[in-house]
Image (tube, grey):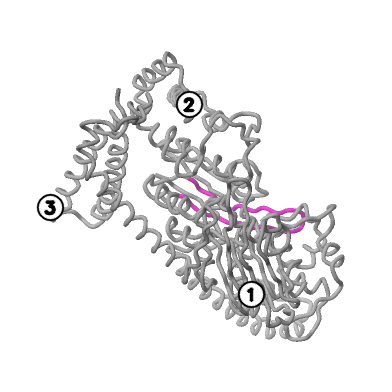
């Protein structure tokens, strides 16, 4: 089914064109990543498709049966309303029934039995249990609890997860044909959430237009890349690696084409100068062709490359040393006797679930927070460069060039030369016309790039990077990675970007909670594989223990065993039905796969699905065993 057609779209702001005469189509099932430098029109293009902006020229056609849903960078919530009221803001009978049931069965409260009975009857009447299970999965995986609290009381990251949950619930329920537009969906998600979202989007078979800096996520989810570059749109089928190869090939061809046009232009210019004023029809045609060649020949092949060749302050023998460091906030323990001595050129990744204290750890290294006990000794030559999540802090709005000149008029480079503030901005992809833009008018990514500039000009020799990839475009990220690979100083990185971490870090500090920090000798992907193996081993051990005590538990609940809640009884009753249905599905799939007659395109999704079914059976079996230990009376 044909979802969207974009024809001849042109959009400018002032004298600066973002894109000219671009056209593309979106078909049902497409999963497209939109790539471009920050400030070149990604967000504007998305807003035009949504109908929130009007193009200068061209048109957008959307099929009448298609609903466009967007996850934006900034969510439009009613901050005074609760989480569940914002998520279920449609006046729909099924959604209303699920909202009522979820509020009545919130953990930590005793429900009104009369109301709960009525809510369950309503759920039965509307056959809403299947969708309720999907809602529970989405909320649980995104770590969204306490549904009755106001959205305004949540952090920015928590609000982003609530917005993501709302979008996923919307597309899963109401519309058969949905174009889902997602702007940086992985920001504020930890790795387990990102991996779950990858699988979820694959299972739901949504039609997707995506802006992301997470290249593993892009490769896992998308099968096509559209790039806005030099006011034009280029389309590449395949993964990120294929995109890079074909983009490089295209740029080589463009350079060759411009060079050929320049040679022709020189010859034609000489001919034009020799022509008399009165021209024949033949010479007039050649004159017209000359102007076409001139336009091509004067095309500037802008090598849009962020140049990071800044000077680094000399690094002495003593770097940074932590001795028996303790830190806690009440019962929340972050460090428990942490010891470590940094070496020259060391690259350390810091990982762990949200809320375990990663940012607090960085703040202690920087001296912004003090440990409860222990010592943090910093070498005399250490100059920190702190690239924080807070981003650029400006007391009052000013132009980009004024901000930089307030720091310094000239900047030393690694080769010993100096450049002016304006030239330094050029190296960071801020051309002359952009330098006089007010900072408030910059895109989120451009502000991040300016923040990076303001840190590097201080010539730091110890970089502390807290989620550095958020809001940076892919071309800038690639150059930043190459710079960090050549950087001679120390680097410590907190990031959920698996690609970025894999490329840069030598080892990891894994914050496991309760003050435990594991020093893991490997990159991020290696750690995740090890972690999955450990989780699998622990699950198997738990199953063995459960199985060994199963018969005894069923025969006679232990003295003082907790009684099942009303909600748990309902779940226990449904689990047997769900497991029986999954067993039937498993048998049916196995029969199809063993028939030997299935074409490959049908075999692949069935193979994927049987793995999911087996995992679901394991999970539900474990939950059934857990509930069976409770007192049913």
At x 27% / y 35%, what residue is drawn?
578
Q: Residues within 10 Å of mark 2 (few under 14, many from 20)?
A: some
Spatial distance from mark 3 to mark 2, Cα to Cα?
44 Å
At x 68% / y 67%, what residue is drawn?
376
Q: Residues within 10 Å of mark 1 (few under 14, many from 20)?
A: many
Question: SS for tag 1?
Answer: strand
Q: Residues within 10 Å of mark 3 (few under 14, many from 20)?
A: few
> From the image, which quarter does the N terminus lie in?
top left
Q: In this rendering, is residue 604 above or below 256?
A: above
Among the two numbered marks 1 and 2 on one chain, the one whose residue lies closer to the N terminus: 2
Q: Which residue is mark 2?
A: 99
- The answer to whether residue 9 is magenta is yes
Residue 260 tag number:
none
Q: Nearer the viewer, residue 456 or 285?
A: 456
At x 42% / y 45%, what residue is drawn?
206
Q: Nearer the viewer, residue 617 or 8?
A: 617
Magenta range is: 4-26
Spatial distance from mark 1 to mark 2, Cα to Cα?
50 Å
Question: SS for tag 3?
Answer: loop
Tell me: 620 left or right of 140: left
Q: Farthest residue in the top direction?
A: 114
Q: Nearer the viewer, residue 586 or 108?
A: 108
- The image shows residue 197 at horizontal and vertical percentages of 45, 49
> Are the residues flagged by discs 1 and 2 in contact, CB closer than 8 Å?
no
Q: Which residue is mark 3?
A: 595
Q: Which residue is mark 1?
A: 490
Question: SS for tag 2?
Answer: helix
Spatial distance from mark 1 to mark 3, Cα to Cα?
58 Å
């Amino acid at each position: 089914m044909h979802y969207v057609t974009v024809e001849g779209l042109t959009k400018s702001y002032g004298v600066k064109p973002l894109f000219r005469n671009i056209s593309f189509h979106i078909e049902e099932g497409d999963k497209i990543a939109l790539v471009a430098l920050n400030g070149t029109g990604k967000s504007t293009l998305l807003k035009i498709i949504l109908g929130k902006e009007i193009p200068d020229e061209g048109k957008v056609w959307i099929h009448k049966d298609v609903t466009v849903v967007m996850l934006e960078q900034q969510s439009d919530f009613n901050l005074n309303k609760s989480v569940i009221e914002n998520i279920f803001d449609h006046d729909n009978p099924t959604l209303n029934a699920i909202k009522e049931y979820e509020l009545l069965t919130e953990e930590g409260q005793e429900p009104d039995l009369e109301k709960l009975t009525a809510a369950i009857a309503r759920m039965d009447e509307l056959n809403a249990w299947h969708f309720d299970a999907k809602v529970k999965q989405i909320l649980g995986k995104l770590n969204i609890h306490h549904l009755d609290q106001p959205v305004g009381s949540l952090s920015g990251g928590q609000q982003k997860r609530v917005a993501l949950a709302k979008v996923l619930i919307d597309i899963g329920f109401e519309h058969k044909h949905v174009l889902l537009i997602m702007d940086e969906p992985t920001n504020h998600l930890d790795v387990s959430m990102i991996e779950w979202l990858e699988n979820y989007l694959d299972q739901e078979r949504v039609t997707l237009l995506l802006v992301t800096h997470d290249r593993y996520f892009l490769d896992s989810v998308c099968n096509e890349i559209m790039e806005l570059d030099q006011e034009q749109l280029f389309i590449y089928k395949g993964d990120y690696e294929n995109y890079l190869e074909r983009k490089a090939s295209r740029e080589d061809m463009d350079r060759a084409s411009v060079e050929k046009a320049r040679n022709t232009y020189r010859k034609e210019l000489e001919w034009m100068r020799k022509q008399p004023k009165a021209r024949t029809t033949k010479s007039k045609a050649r004159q017209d062709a000359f102007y076409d060649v001139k336009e091509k020949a004067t095309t500037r092949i802008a090598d849009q490359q962020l140049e990071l060749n800044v000077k680094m302050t000399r690094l002495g023998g003593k770097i940074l040393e932590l001795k028996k460091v303790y830190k806690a906030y009440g019962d929340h323990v972050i460090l428990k006797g942490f010891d470590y001595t940094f070496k020259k050129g060391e690259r350390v990744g810091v990982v762990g679930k949200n809320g375990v204290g990663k940012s607090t750890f960085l703040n202690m290294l920087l001296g912004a927070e003090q440990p409860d006990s222990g010592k943090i000794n910093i070498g005399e030559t250490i100059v920190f460069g702190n690239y924080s999540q807070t981003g650029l802090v400006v007391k009052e709005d000013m132009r980009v060039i004024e901000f930089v000149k307030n720091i310094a008029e000239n900047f030393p480079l690694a080769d010993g030369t100096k450049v002016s503030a304006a030239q330094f901005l050029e190296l960071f992809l801020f051309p002359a016309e952009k330098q006089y833009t007010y900072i408030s008018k910059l895109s989120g990514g451009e502000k991040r790039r300016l923040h990076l500039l303001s840190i590097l000009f201080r010539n730091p020799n110890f970089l502390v990077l807290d989620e550095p990839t958020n809001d940076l475009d892919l071309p800038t990220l690639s150059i930043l990675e190459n710079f960090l690979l050549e950087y001679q100083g120390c680097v410590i990185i907190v990031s959920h970007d698996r690609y970025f971490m894999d490329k840069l870090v030598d080892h990891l500090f894994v914050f496991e909670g309760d003050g435990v920090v594991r020093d893991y000798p490997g990159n991020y992907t290696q750690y995740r594989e090890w972690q999955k193996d450990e989780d699998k081993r622990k699950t198997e051990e738990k199953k063995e223990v459960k199985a060994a005590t199963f018969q005894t538990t069923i025969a006679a609940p232990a003295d003082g065993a907790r009684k099942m809640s009303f909600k748990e009884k309902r779940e226990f009753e449904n689990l047997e039905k769900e497991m029986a249905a999954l067993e039937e599905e498993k048998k049916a799939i196995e029969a199809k796969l063993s028939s030997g007659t299935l074409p490959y395109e049908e075999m692949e999704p069935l193979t994927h699905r049987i793995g999911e079914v087996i995992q679901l059976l394991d999970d539900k079996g474990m939950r059934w065993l857990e509930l069976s230990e409770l007192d049913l009376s």
